[in-house]
Amino acid sequence: MATGTMAMAEKGKVKVAVFDDAGNLTGVEEVPRIAKADAEWKAELPEAVYLVMRKKGTERAFTGRYYQNHEEGIYRCASCGTALFSSKTKFDSGTGWPSFYEPVHQLNVKVESDLSLGMERDEVVCARCHGHLGHVFPDGPPPTGMRYCMNSAALLFVRRK
Ligand code: FE
């Protein structure tokens, strides 16, 4: 971890890129990290969101609200509102989960090693609230070759105004 990142983690702050609902980057801001007790998350999040974001659950394929969404807009974190993905990078992966070839900004998501279920996968989490979003795999389309396989329950779509 870079020294700068370490210092920010200690201060409980995180740098995120801020996007308006038209999908424009309005700046990079240092904001307080969001950390809550499990009971607090459980009380405030809808159950489906809680199970995915705080318990690292996976919604059943072809059941989420966004895998077939083709509207233009921004996908925000369902827990904290941080902008995570743009419809511009969404593609039909055929998996039954909303899939993107890159995050809206590298600052806004973090990738961590996940060794659960006897697999070695790269878990994707929200940089601000550390909520589980899904996983990323190196079998996506150009230009990145990456497939960010997300749970609809972890996202909140905001249609472009
Ligand atoms: Fe978040």
Image: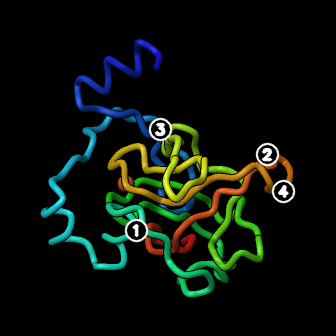
First in residue order: circle 4 vs circle 1: 1
Q: Is residue 26 visible?
A: no
Q: Residue at x 40, y 68 (%)?
A: 52
Describe the element under mark 1 as helix, strand or loop. Answer: helix
What kind of residue is marked 1?
A: Val
Circle 1 Cα neighbour tier, 10 Å, few/some/many (<14 / 14–19 / ≥20): many
Q: Residue at x 41, y 62 (%)?
A: 56
In the image, 11 versus 52, the foreground residue is 52
What kind of residue is marked 3?
A: Gly
Circle 4 Cα neighbour tier, 10 Å, few/some/many (<14 / 14–19 / ≥20): some
Quickly name the residue at label 1.
52
Quickly name the residue at label 4.
141
Q: For residue 55, which quarter of the picture? A: bottom left
In the image, 16 versus 67, the foreground residue is 67
Residue 140 coordinates in the image, percent (x, y): 79, 56
Nearer the camera: disc 3 or disc 2:
2
